[in-house]
């Protein structure tokens, strides 16, 4: 194990120096002809179908911040299935590749959807994201969400794995991918005791030069341009349930991310996710859906206000897939839909001051006064005896799925499913060049649009960051083996030729080197071994990955072997 804590300062300095070199080298790319914008802010209200957007507008009482920029519909299907989960849906926006259930920024295995074919690059293979390509162009990058930061949508932009469930690997990849600003929840997933690899990941964040913040007050005063802000052990609260002294709002996080990232003259890419619109939709809780959608709308407003002043920023607002079959009007309005007053659909929802999830903390253990508590916080004052009994019986963490449909019935909101749905979703784009997508487009086109607008090259980025290691080292007559014994939690790919040896650590952005001079380009002191001898490493352009069959590493590591 490297003693990261002890050499934190040295490592942070080395990385700061290296990243300055990287920025200087790539300035040409950022200014390259053909870019129509300097910055892109992509905002995703996860799992928000069209109807909740309509109802949110009614409840807001005025237009949503992005209404006037609505320009297209987006198809959300997978490479093999009609209905997508967040992993392939967000990956399509991030990489321009269709994939399958659970795939994070990697190609899929099965390509059977009408009109598509398997990518020539191979199956279950990492493909570069617009965030990674933006970073290679010298731009700063950021991820903001209200879920744990290694959850599918944020992971889609800075992680790669055939499975979204690999939280240990994805969290480490996001940290070692040098995303400048990461704001959201999920610090408990970084604690060694909760990780199969038992790594002390929190120390590593600090060692990499991040300001580590845990409260809204710390976030507010931070002047850092590299910030890791984690405000909850797992997901953050719904906006309606949020304690503003403990967790910042999505709009505050968006604002801080923009001010930190816009310090880079080369520009930035930022992804902002209103994560729990989707979670409330799974629970069929219209209060959670609408209130978190309106919190998302406030974050969009922050982005649009910045873009209006900056005049060099594209703002894209689009959900990744539908969820719940939410409808304004349900079976109770069958014969009276055109005689149902406006407020029927929103008055009950407006009375709630907590979501179904937030309500849970107020239900007493003895379930003594369910009726009063639900009336006070959720606005329903006519619960039947059966409903009271169902609420009393709700399993921990499942109350929103019990009271949500009760609210739906009162507000005449219909739900057809507690899962995702396969219809098109709405795209809104502010593009100062006027060059935005229109018509019905495939979700992969969002990545291609960002690629064009920032003059990125996703294929070149994939080639530079994720070369097939065995093939590439083999071409240099280097001998390749896997070392799972030196540090079993962090398996290494070892490439050896003559005196030169590279031990490439999985999910990280470096290789431990032997036989290369300390003064060689890109080489820095990683730490010291038990005998006080310096461990040298070479920084990779990206994170090194193992997909269960093959290793994928940055070209500059391969180039370290002559
Ligand atoms: Zn989703």
Image (tube, helix red, strand yellow):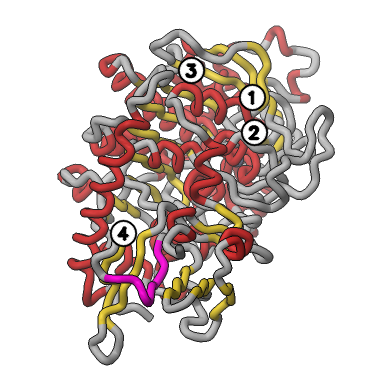
Per the image, label 4 sits on a secondary structure element best described as loop
Per the picture, the main secondary structure of the magenta-coloured stretch is strand
Q: Nearer the viewer, mark 4 or mark 3?
A: 4
**Do the residues bearing badges 4 and 3 touch, measured as CB atoms within 8 Å?**
no
Query: What residue do we see at 25% from left, 47% from top?
Result: 21
Q: Earlier in the sequence, mark 1 or mark 4?
A: 1
Can the viewer see residue 271? Answer: yes
Rate crowding at label 3 as few (under 14), some (14 to 19) or many (20 or more) other CA atoms within 10 Å: many
Report the residue marked by disc 4: 522
Residue 149 x/y as whole percent: 45, 52
Rate crowding at label 2 as few (under 14), some (14 to 19) or many (20 or more) other CA atoms within 10 Å: many
Report the residue marked by disc 1: 425
Q: Is residue 534 above or below residue 495?
A: below
Mark 2 to mark 4 CA distance (whole Å): 42 Å
Mark 1 to mark 4 CA distance (whole Å): 45 Å
Rate crowding at label 1 as few (under 14), some (14 to 19) or many (20 or more) other CA atoms within 10 Å: many
Q: State which image quarter holds ligand 1.
A: top right
Q: Earlier in the sequence, mark 4 or mark 3?
A: 3
Mark 2 to mark 1 CA distance (whole Å): 6 Å
For the residue pair 401 and 113, the one nearer the viewer reads as 113
Label 2 near ligand 1 (CB < 8 Å): yes
What number is the disc on residue 321? 2
Tell me which segment is drawn in magenta: 510-517
């Amino acid at each position: 194990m490297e003693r990261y804590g002890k050499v934190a300062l040295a490592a942070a300095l080395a990385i700061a120096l290296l990243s300055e070199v990287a920025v200087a080298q790539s300035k040409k790319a950022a200014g390259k002809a053909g870019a129509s914008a300097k910055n892109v802010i992509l905002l995703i209200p996860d799992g928000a179908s069209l109807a909740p957007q309509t109802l949110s507008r009614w409840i807001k009482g005025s237009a949503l911040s992005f209404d006037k920029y609505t320009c297209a519909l987006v198809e959300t299907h997978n490479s093999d299935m009609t209905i997508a989960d967040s992993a392939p849906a967000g990956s399509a926006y991030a990489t321009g590749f269709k994939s399958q259930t659970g795939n994070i920024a990697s190609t899929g295995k099965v390509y059977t959807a009408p009109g598509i074919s398997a990518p020539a690059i191979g199956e279950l293979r990492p493909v570069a994201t617009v965030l990674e390509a933006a970073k290679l162009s010298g731009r700063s990058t950021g991820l903001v969400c209200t879920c744990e930061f290694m959850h599918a949508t944020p992971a889609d932009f800075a992680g790669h794995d055939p499975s979204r469930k690999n939280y240990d690997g994805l969290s480490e990849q996001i940290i070692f991918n040098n995303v400048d600003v990461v704001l959201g929840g999920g610090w408990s997933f970084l604690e060694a005791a909760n990780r199969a690899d038992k790594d002390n990941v929190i120390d590593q964040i600090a060692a990499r030069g991040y300001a580590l913040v845990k409260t809204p007050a710390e976030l507010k005063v931070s002047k850092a341009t590299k910030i890791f802000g984690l405000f909850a052990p797992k997901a953050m609260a719904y906006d309606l349930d949020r304690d503003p002294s403990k967790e910042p709002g999505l709009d505050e996080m968006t604002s801080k991310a923009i001010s930190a990232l816009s310090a880079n003259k080369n520009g930035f890419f930022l992804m902002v996710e209103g994560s729990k619109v989707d979670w409330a939709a799974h629970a069929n809780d219209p209060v959670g859906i609408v209130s978190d959608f309106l919190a998302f709308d406030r974050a969009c407003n922050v982005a649009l206000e910045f873009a209006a002043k900056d005049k060099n920023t594209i703002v894209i607002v689009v959900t990744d897939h539908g969820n719940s079959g939410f409808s304004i009007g349900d079976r109770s309005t069958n014969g009276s839909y055109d005689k149902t007053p406006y407020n029927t659909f929103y008055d009950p929802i407006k009375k709630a001051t907590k979501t179904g999830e937030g309500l849970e903390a107020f239900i007493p253990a003895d379930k003594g006064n369910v009726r009063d508590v639900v009336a006070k916080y959720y606005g329903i004052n006519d619960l039947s005896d059966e409903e009271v009994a169902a609420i009393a019986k709700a399993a921990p963490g499942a109350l929103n799925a019990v009271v949500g449909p009760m609210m739906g019935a009162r507000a005449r909101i219909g739900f057809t499913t507690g899962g995702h749905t396969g219809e098109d979703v709405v795209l809104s784009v502010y593009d100062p060049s006027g060059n935005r997508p229109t018509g019905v487009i495939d979700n992969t086109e969002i990545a291609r649009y960002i690629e064009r607008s920032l003059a990125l090259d996703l294929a070149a980025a994939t080639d530079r960051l994720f070369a097939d290691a065995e093939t590439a080292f083999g071409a240099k007559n280097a001998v390749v083996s896997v070392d799972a014994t030196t540090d079993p939690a962090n398996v290494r790919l070892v490439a050896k030729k003559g005196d030169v040896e590279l031990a490439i650590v999985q999910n990280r952005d470096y290789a431990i080197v032997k036989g290369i001079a300390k003064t060689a380009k890109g080489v820095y002191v990683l730490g010291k071994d038990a005998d006080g001898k310096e461990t040298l490493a070479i920084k990779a352009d990206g994170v090194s990955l193992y997909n269960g069959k093959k290793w994928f590493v940055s070209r500059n590591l391969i180039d370290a072997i002559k």
